[in-house]
Image (tube, coloured by chain):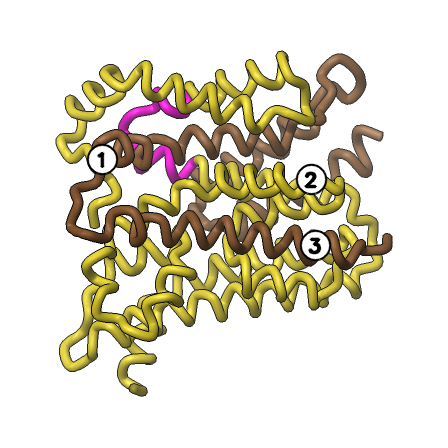
Chain colours: A brown, B yellow
C-alpha cells in the first residue's frame, strides 16, 4: 500500500494538536484560581467508562450478525480477553491471548 | 540526578511493562497497515495518546477527512481535560518543563503522578519530570520494536487488528472495577448501538457522543445518588 504522505502528515499533526489541546485546556481555562464548573467535573468523572464502551462497539462496528460467521469469532475473542484479564490481570497476556484466539478462529475455524 | 532517575524508574516499572507491550501492538498494526517505523515513531512522539493512536490506524487507512479526525480525537481524548485539573497548581513551579508535563499527561502518567510520593532527598519537580519522560520513552521503544517486528513477520496476520479491541476490553474491565456505578457504561452501550442502528457503521461516533453527553446529563441525579450511596468520594479526578 502506498502512503499518501501529505495527507498522513497533516492528519497526524491534527491529532497531535487536538490531543495537546485537551491536555492544555484546564491550564488555560481554569488556571486563574477559578473553581472548576461542577458539570465539567461531573462529565470528567463519568464520560470515560461510557466512551470506552463506545470504542469497543466502534471496533466491532463492521461485524455482520446476519450471515456466517455471525460474529462468533468476535464473541469468542472478547470473552477470551475478559476471562484472561479477570483471572490474571496482566494486560499483555489478555491482549495477546485474545488476539491469538481470534486469529485462529477466523483463519482456521470459521473460514 | 542519578538518585532521581532511579527513584522515578522504580515507580514507572508497571507502566513500562504496559507501554512497551501496547506500544509493540500499535507499531505492529501500523506497520501491517502499510506505515513504516518512521510514521509509527512520529505518531508516538507527537500525538502520544494510546487509544487514539489505535483508532488513528483505522481513520488513516480509510482516508477519513481532517475535520472528522479532529472530532474523533477530541472525543477519544476529552477525558484528558480533567487530568490537568489536578495539576494546575502543582505544575506552576515547573518552568521550562511545564509544557512537556502538560503535553505528556496520558492516563498512565496521570495515575502515577497522582499516586507517587516523592522519596526523601529527591527534588519533587525533577522526580515528576523523570516519571513523565520515562513513560514516553517506553512508549516510543515499544512502538519501534512492534514496527520492526511487523516488517519481519511473514505468517498470515489476518485478524491481528483484534488487538485494538482487546486493548479496549482490558481498559473497560479495569474501569468497571474502579467505578462503583455502572449507569455510564449502560449509557455508552445504549447510545452507541442506537447510533449504529440509526446512522450506520461509518458515522456512529459523533451521534453516539451526543447521545452519551445528553444521557449523562439527564441521568445525573441517579448517577450521583448511586455513587453517593456506595462510595462517598464522588470526585475521581481529585488526586
Q: Quadrant of residue B65?
A: top right
Q: Disc 1 and disc 2: Cα gap in Å?
A: 33 Å
Cα–Cα gap, marks 3 and 2: 19 Å
Q: Position of residue B147 (x, y in %)?
A: 69, 63
Towards the viewer: B1 or B75: B75
Residue B90: percent from left, percent from top:
21, 62
Q: Residues within 10 Å of mark 3 (few under 14, many from 20)?
A: many
Q: In the drawing, does residue B10 fall left or right of residue A12? A: left
Residue at the spot 70% in from the left edge and 66% down from the top edge: B37
Query: Which of the two residues, A99 or A61, is positioned nearer the viewer here?
Result: A61
Q: Main secondary structure of the magenta part?
A: helix
Q: Residue at x 58, y 17 (%)?
A: B195
Q: Residue at x 21, y 32 (%)?
A: A38
Quarter of the rendering containing residue B95: bottom left
Judging from the image, mark 3 belongs to the subunit labelled B
Label 1 and label 2 in one chain: no
B215 with respect to A52 (left or right): left
- Read off the chain for label 1: A
Whether residues under marks 3 and 2 lie with C-beta atoms below 8 angstroms apart, the answer is no
Q: Dot 1 corresponds to which residue? A: A37
> What's drawn in magenta, residue-wise?
B173-186
Do pointers 1 and 3 mark residues of a single chain? no
Mark yes or no: residue B49 visible. yes
A32 above or below B141? above
Residue B182 in magenta stretch = yes
Residue at mark 3: B30
Mark 2 — residue?
A: B65
Tell me if B233 is positioned left or right of B44 in this view.
left
Amino acid at each position: 500500500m502506498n502512503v499518501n504522505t501529505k495527507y498522513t502528515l497533516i492528519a497526524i499533526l491534527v491529532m497531535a494538536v487536538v490531543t495537546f489541546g485537551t491536555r492544555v485546556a484546564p491550564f488555560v481555562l481554569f488556571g486563574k484560581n477559578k473553581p472548576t464548573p461542577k458539570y465539567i467535573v461531573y462529565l470528567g468523572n463519568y464520560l470515560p467508562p461510557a466512551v470506552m464502551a463506545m470504542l469497543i462497539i466502534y471496533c466491532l462496528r463492521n461485524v455482520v450478525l446476519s450471515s456466517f460467521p455471525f460474529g462468533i469469532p468476535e464473541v469468542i475473542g472478547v470473552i477470551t480477553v475478559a476471562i484472561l484479564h479477570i483471572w490474571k490481570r496482566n494486560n499483555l497476556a489478555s491482549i495477546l491471548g485474545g488476539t491469538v484466539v481470534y486469529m485462529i478462529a477466523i483463519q482456521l475455524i470459521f473460514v | 540526578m542519578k538518585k532521581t532517575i532511579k527513584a522515578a524508574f522504580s515507580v514507572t516499572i508497571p507502566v513500562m511493562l504496559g507501554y512497551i507491550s501496547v506500544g509493540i501492538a500499535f507499531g505492529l498494526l501500523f506497520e501491517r497497515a502499510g506505515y513504516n517505523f518512521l510514521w509509527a515513531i512520529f505518531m508516538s512522539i507527537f500525538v502520544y495518546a494510546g487509544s487514539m493512536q489505535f483508532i488513528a490506524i483505522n481513520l488513516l487507512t480509510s482516508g477519513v477527512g481532517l475535520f472528522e479526525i479532529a472530532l474523533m480525537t477530541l472525543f477519544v481524548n476529552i477525558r484528558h481535560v480533567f487530568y490537568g485539573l489536578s495539576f494546575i497548581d502543582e505544575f506552576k513551579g515547573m518552568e521550562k518543563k511545564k509544557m512537556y508535563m502538560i503535553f505528556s499527561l496520558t492516563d498512565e502518567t496521570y495515575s502515577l503522578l497522582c499516586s507517587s510520593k516523592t522519596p526523601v532527598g529527591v527534588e519533587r519537580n525533577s522526580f515528576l519530570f523523570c516519571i513523565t519522560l520515562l513513560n514516553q520513552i517506553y512508549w516510543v521503544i515499544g512502538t519501534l520494536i512492534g514496527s520492526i517486528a511487523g516488517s519481519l513477520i511473514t505468517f498470515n496476520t489476518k485478524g491481528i487488528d483484534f488487538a485494538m479491541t482487546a486493548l479496549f476490553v482490558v481498559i473497560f474491565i479495569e474501569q468497571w472495577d474502579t467505578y462503583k456505578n455502572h449507569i455510564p457504561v449502560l449509557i455508552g452501550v445504549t447510545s452507541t448501538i442506537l447510533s449504529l442502528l440509526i446512522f450506520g457503521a461509518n458515522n456512529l461516533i459523533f451521534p453516539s457522543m451526543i447521545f452519551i453527553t445528553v444521557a449523562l446529563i439527564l441521568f445525573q441525579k441517579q448517577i450521583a445518588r448511586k455513587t453517593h450511596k456506595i462510595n462517598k468520594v464522588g470526585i475521581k479526578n481529585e488526586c
